[in-house]
Each structure stands twice: as structure tokens, then as C-alpha cells.
Image: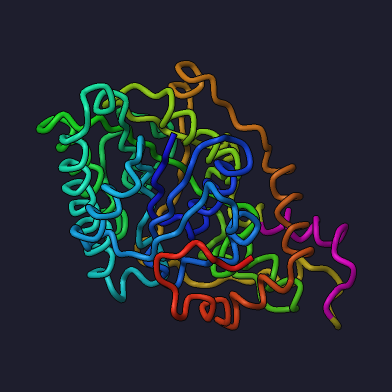
């Protein structure tokens, strides 16, 4: 297959592309605007592969995307491009509406035009895979059942609302125009190459530097943690085997309080880190509490019964095994972390256009 991935230089997108190049025979075109979240160094291991290509483009640029589609002639589009920095959404919600809503609309229209002009057999086999989030469901309270494909939408933040809007657009283009779509909603991802401003990598790197480990509010917020490689295996299952028009929720079966996750990371660092910061008896001594964001959801949980039953996918990693791999990766890759933290990773983009001579 020829698969076009939007947002492929981001955390999940880059993991997906690495998986596609390393474990399949598919050709991959990565369309990424290369904003702050796009890091080409996360793709350095596969950048010179002849089955991979990168185009720096904004999905809001419908004419540009249409030209890319006509040239590459994809059999599937996997749409991950998004604005998702929750810590900044309340400061600039317009960016989220522009990328998540207007960008998805523009991509859908470019795709519809491309798809309608393909031969009948190709139209039938084509898939538009919209990768969304469980945040569109809001949060769970008390003994609420885990989110599933039928859970009503109740977004509680501008980011979640913009993602919910994009979901509705995708399903409308399926119902109105017949575009063959599949939609997935996943829980919180973690793993290698995750930007250091997110909870798990921030906890690891702050601990190594002897800095406070942020615990929002009372630390009892519960997330369902999904190892990123498990997620991308599920995405490939859905785009190749999922039923047209269907939605699949994807989770890791790893519901844990944020405070317990931080403590678990500290325990792993006690075992794996070569040294401890000066003056610190135990890494867990660094855990400190900070105020919640006003839009902070309380609990997430995912019912994965549908994707397990219909597509045969189950997560491989437990939180224990996934966190161990993640902590070890950050210990083994300090240069990648440093370049993200000081912003120097963005220098690789200067002068880049539509060429395949990416960083090696």
C-alpha cells in the first residue's frame, strides 16, 4: 500500500511511520507542517529509506494537499496532524480550531476530490483513517463505565471540543459523500521520543536533574496509559482490517493514578539510573504538588472489547514493562532530550522543501 500520514513527525505519527517502514512493505508519505511538536530526529533511523518521503505542508492548504495526493496516489490516509498541547490550549484556542477543525475540513475536501476521481476498485479499497482522542468523551466520575464507541461526547476543554468537531466532520463526509472512513479514539500514549513537556518524560528528566516532579492537584487523577508501539499496531489493524464507517476505542488496560505513575518512575530510576542528583536521598523526595489546570479531566478509562473481538488486537505492554522501556530509552538518549529541551532540533528544518534527503 501507499499510505499518507499527516503529522508524521509528531510523537505518535513518528512511531507509526517507524513501524510501517521497519515492519511492513508499505510506502509512506509524511505530510507535516513541522511546528514545535514535529521533530525530524524522531525519524532519523528511517529517513533515508527509499519507501519513505516527507513533504512539509499545512493541511489547511487544500490546494497543496490536493497536489500531493495526485502525485503520491495513496491507498489510505492516516490523519494524525493536530494541535494537542493541553497546557497551552487555554492561552490560544484559535490554533486548535484552525488545525483540528479547519485543517480536517480542508483535508477531507482534498481527499474527497481525489477519491471520487479514482477507479471504482480503488475507491472501494481506499480508507481515510481519522485518529482522535478519548478526551472528546469528557471524563469519568465515581463508578462510571469506561469509555466505549457509543459513549456520548462531552468535551471539557477547547482542545477536546476541536477534536470532537473534527470527528463529526469525518463522519459527515462518510454519510453525505460516501467517503470510506474509520475513526479511532485512544487513551494517553507514552514511550520513546515523547516530548519532555509531557507527564512521563518530564517526570523522568526532572528527576535526573534533581528538579521538582509535578503532581497536579491531589495527584489522584487516573489515566489509562497506552504504550505508543501498542497503539500504532492497533492503528495499522484498523486501517487495513477495520470496517468502513466504524469507530474503535484503543486503550492500554493500564489505569493508574498520576501520583502512582510518578512513584513507579522514581522506583525504576532508583534501579536503572547510574547516579542520583546531589543532595537527594530518594528520587521520590522530588514529588511536589502543583495546581490543576481549570479544564483538567478527572478520570479516563477505555473499553477495548470491540477492537479485541473484531480485529484481534490486544496491548502487549503492561505499565510495568512499558515504563521500564521508556525510562531506559530516556537514559540511553540524552542528546535527543537535550536538543528538544534547548530547541536546537528545530534547526534541521531550515531550507527544507519536498526532498527526500532528510537527516540521516
Query: 4 or 152: nearer the eye?
Result: 4
Residue 160, compared with residue 125, is above or below; it is: below
Query: 113 or 242: nearer the eye?
Result: 113
Q: Residue at x 32, y 42 (%)?
A: 73
x and y percent of residue 332 in the render? 79, 63
Residue 110, compared with residue 249, is above or below; it is: below
Left or right placement of residue 22 versus residue 291 in this view: right
Q: Residue at x 59, y 52 (%)?
A: 49
x and y percent of residue 335 in the render? 71, 74
Left or right placement of residue 269 versus residue 71 in this view: right
Residue segment shown in magenta: 262-277
Left or right placement of residue 289 versus residue 321 in this view: left
x and y percent of residue 90 in the render? 31, 71
**Residue 141 visible within the image:** no
Residue 78 is a magenta residue: no
Query: 216 or 360: nearer the eye?
Result: 360
Q: Residue at x 40, y 70 (%)?
A: 353
Residue 270 is a magenta residue: yes
Residue 348, compared with residue 357, is above or below; it is: below
Amino acid at each position: 500500500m501507499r499510505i499518507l500520514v499527516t503529522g508524521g513527525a509528531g510523537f505518535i505519527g513518528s512511531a507509526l511511520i517507524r513501524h510501517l517502514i521497519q515492519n511492513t512493505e508499505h510506502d509512506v508519505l509524511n505530510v507535516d507542517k513541522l511546528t514545535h511538536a514535529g521533530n525530524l530526529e524522531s525519524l532519523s533511523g528511517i529517513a533515508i529509506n527509499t519507501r519513505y518521503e516527507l513533504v512539509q505542508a499545512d493541511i489547511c492548504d487544500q490546494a497543496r494537499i490536493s497536489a500531493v495526493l495526485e502525485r503520491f496516489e495513496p491507498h489510505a490516509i492516516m490523519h494524525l496532524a493536530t494541535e494537542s498541547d493541553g497546557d497551552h490550549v487555554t492561552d490560544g484556542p484559535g490554533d486548535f480550531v484552525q488545525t483540528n477543525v479547519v485543517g480536517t475540513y480542508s483535508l477531507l475536501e482534498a481527499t474527497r476530490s481525489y477519491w471520487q476521481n479514482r477507479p471504482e476498485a480503488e475507491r472501494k479499497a481506499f480508507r481515510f483513517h481519522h485518529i482522535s482522542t478519548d478526551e472528546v468523551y469528557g471524563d469519568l466520575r465515581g463508578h462510571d463505565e469506561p469509555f466505549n464507541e457509543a459513549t456520548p461526547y462531552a468535551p471539557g476543554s477547547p482542545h477536546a471540543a476541536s477534536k470532537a468537531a473534527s470527528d463529526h466532520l469525518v463522519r459527515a463526509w462518510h454519510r453525505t459523500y460516501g467517503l470510506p472512513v474509520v475513526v479511532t479514539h485512544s487513551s494517553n500514549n507514552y514511550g520513546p521520543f515523547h516530548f519532555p513537556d509531557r507527564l512521563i518524560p518530564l517526570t523522568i528528566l526532572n528527576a535526573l536533574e534533581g528538579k521538582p516532579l509535578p503532581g497536579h492537584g491531589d495527584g489522584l487523577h487516573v489515566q489509562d496509559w497506552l504504550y505508543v508501539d501498542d497503539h500504532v499496531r492497533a492503528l495499522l489493524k484498523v486501517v487495513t482490517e477495520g470496517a468502513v464507517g466504524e469507530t474503535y476505542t484503543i486503550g492500554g488496560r493500564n489505569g493508574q493514578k498520576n501520583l502512582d505513575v510518578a512513584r513507579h518512575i522514581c522506583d525504576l530510576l532508583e534501579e536503572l539510573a547510574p547516579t542520583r542528583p546531589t543532595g537527594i536521598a530518594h528520587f521520590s523526595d522530588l514529588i511536589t504538588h502543583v495546581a490543576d489546570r481549570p479544564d483538567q479531566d478527572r478520570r479516563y478509562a477505555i473499553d477495548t472489547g470491540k477492537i479485541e473481538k473484531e480485529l484481534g488486537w490486544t496491548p502487549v505492554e503492561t505499565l510495568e514493562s512499558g515504563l521500564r522501556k521508556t525510562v531506559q530509552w530516556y537514559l540511553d538518549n540524552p542528546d535527543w532530550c537535550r536538543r528538544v529541551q534547548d530547541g536546537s532540533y528545530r534547526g534541521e528544518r531550515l531550507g527544507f522543501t519536498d526532498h527526500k534527503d532528510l537527516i540521516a
